[in-house]
Image (spheres, helix red, strand yellow):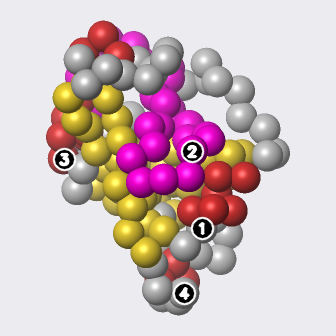
Amino acid sequence: MLDADVTIPGETRSRVALADDSLDLLRRLWVQHGPLMFHQSGGCCDGSSPMCFPAGELLTTERDVLLGRFDLAPDGDEAQPLEFWMSSEQFAYWSHTHLTVDVVPGRGAGFSVEAPEGVRFVIRSRLMDESEPFA
């Protein structure tokens, strides 16, 4: 499990993590596609699929929230940053949860880069204590 760096001002704990299987897949996808990013929009239920794009392919705006930044690089290698963005409307629903990006067999979502791999990214969530992101 890899926790993202904290990016929301005033918070001290990560809101998003990568499960080991998703980290392995993302490292392989990085080799194929170069720098990557996630964006989560729409949907309100556990299991909604985050979309993974080449970095910069999806333009973010002030209406998006940067939930975290990961470094996918194995120890000692050059940095491989990956940002996780969420629409502000979605964040309003999920602001009380910690998110973990996992990967499962199945058809990838739309233009998400994992689609040809026969897998898809999913979000697993757990409720946070009110003080958790600030503890």
Q: CA distance from mark 2 to mark 1?
A: 14 Å
Asked whether the viewer can see residue 121, the reply is yes
- Choose top left, top right, bottom left or bottom right for residue 94: bottom right
Q: Looking at numbered disc 3 in the image, what kind of residue is underneath it?
A: Asp
Q: CA distance from mark 2 to mark 3?
A: 24 Å
Neighbours of disc 2 within 10 Å: few (<14), some (14-19), many (20+): few
Q: Position of residue 61 (x, y in %)?
A: 78, 38
Left or right: 90, with 52 as reference point = right
Q: CA distance from mark 1 to mark 3?
A: 24 Å
Q: Which of marks 4 and 1 precedes in the sequence?
A: 1
Mark 4, residue position:
130
Q: CA distance from mark 3 to mark 4?
A: 27 Å
Left or right: 67, with 116 as reference point = right
**Mark 1 and 4 residues: CB-CB less than 8 Å, in contact?**
no
* Up-down relation of residue 45 to residue 78 (above or below): below
Which of labels 2 and 1 is toward the front? 2
Q: Which of marks 4 and 2 precedes in the sequence?
A: 2
Q: CA distance from mark 2 to mark 4?
A: 23 Å
Q: Which residues are magenta?
A: 26-54
Left or right: 135, with 1 as reference point = right
Mark 3, residue position:
20
* Residue drawn 39% across the image and 61% down it: 125
